[in-house]
Amino acid sequence: MAHRVTARAAPVADAGSVLVDCDTCVVRGPGCPDCVVTVLLGMPAPPMRIESSSVEALAVLARSGLVPPLRHDRAG
């Protein structure tokens, strides 16, 4: 059985969005194959801001099994 890496995206309070930057992700490597960012954009993905409503929509898709969850976890 493969080890699953669980992480959460770091919210950016002032923008109502989440900053996803693969270069600063602490689960980069083992978490990449099962991350929605890699599935949708490839690796390495450019840094991006994802609006909170889009993060919620991705979570619904992940819970439905249509895409893997967002595994980004910002260092620090």
Image (cartoon, helix red, strand yellow):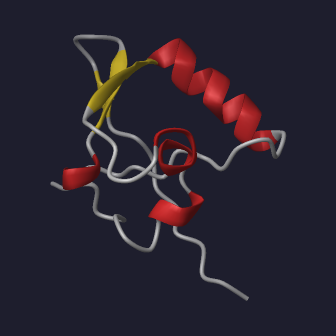
Residue at the location (25% across, 35% down)?
47
Q: In this view, does 67 lie to the left or right of 11?
A: right
In the rendered image, which quarter contains the N terminus? bottom right
Along the horizontal axis of the image, is 63 left or right of 68? Answer: right
Q: Which residue lies furthest to the right in this view?
A: 64
Q: Where is residue 4 in the image (x, y as percent from the top left)?
A: 60, 73
Position above or below: 5 against 23: below
Does residue 70 sit above or below 57 in this rendering?
A: below
- Quadrant for residue 45, please give it: top left
Above or below: residue 3 compared with residue 17 = below
At a point 52% along the width and 69% down the height, the residue shown is 5
* Relative height, residue 35 to residue 53 (above, below): below
Image position, residue 70 (x, y; %): 52, 45
Q: Which of the two residues, 46 or 61, is positioned nearer the viewer here?
A: 46
User: What is the x, y in percent for residue 28?
Assistant: 34, 64
Which residue in the rendered view is the most extreme toward the left?
A: 76
> Which residue is at the far front?
42
In the rendered structure, the answer to whether residue 15 lies left or right of residue 17 reads left
Which sits in the foreground, 37 or 6?
37
**Closest to the observer, 66 or 18:** 66
Say which of 72 and 12 sits in front: 72
Count of picture labels: 0
In the picture, the quarter occupied by the C terminus is bottom left
Residue beneath the point at 47% across and 17% down: 52
Q: Measuring 27% from the left and 11% from the top, which residue is drawn there?
A: 15
- From the viewer's perspective, tell me whether residue 70 is left or right of residue 9: right
